[in-house]
Structures are given as structure tokens and as C-alpha cells.
Amino acid sequence: MAPSPWILATPASRGIGLQLARRLLNTTDLPIVATARKDIDDTREKILEGLDVDPNRLSVLELDVT
């Protein structure tokens, strides 16, 4: 059985990554995995703010590659 598709948006705490994660949540039915260097709860809130989507589709992970 093939794995289910999902989308990775990294980094998603601000700027283009934040807007991309919001757009993908709003226009697809796929699960979204977003990353942020810190404040992952704040990032999750910013991504979901004002969207009428299932919040269970969004996972935000802490990721710092520096």
C-alpha cells in the first residue's frame, strides 16, 4: 500500500512560508506539516487564524538547522 500524501512547508513561522501553509490548508485536503525554529504554538495559531479548516490537518514541528 502506498503512503498517504502530505505537504511540508518549511519554514512557516512568517513570510512566504506562513502564507504558503495557510493557502495550502485552505485549498487542499492534504495534511500539512509546517516547521518553525521556535514558538511552535504561536506559529500554529498564526497559520490557523481566520481559516475555516480542520485544525487536525496541521502539524507544526520545531526545526532549527543552524
Image: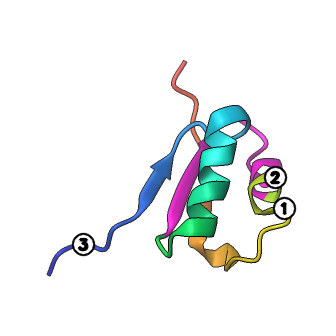
Front label number (3 vs 2): 2
- Name the residue at 56% across, 59% down: 24
The answer to whether residue 58 is above or below residue 1 is above
Q: Quadrant of the N terminus?
A: bottom left
**Left or right of 19: which side holds 63?**
left
**Quarter occupied by residue 27:** bottom right
What x and y, as percent, mark residue 47? 74, 55
- The residue tagged 3 is 3
- Name the residue at 79% across, 42% down: 39
Secondary structure of the residue carrying tag 1 is: loop
Q: In which quarter of the image is the C terminus?
A: top right
Are the residues at dot 1 and dot 2 in contact (C-beta closer than 8 Å)?
A: yes
- The residue tagged 1 is 49
Query: Distance between the Cα atoms at labels 1 and 2?
Result: 5 Å
- Name the residue at 76% across, 77% down: 52
Residue 21 visible in the picture? yes
**Left or right of 14: which side holds 65?**
left
The answer to whether residue 62 is above or below residue 15 is below
Secondary structure of the residue carrying tag 3 is: loop
Which of the pair 13/26 is nearer the observer?
Answer: 26
- The residue tagged 2 is 46
What are the residue bounds of the magenta stretch? 31-44
Determine the residue located farthest toward the front in the rendered image. Answer: 27
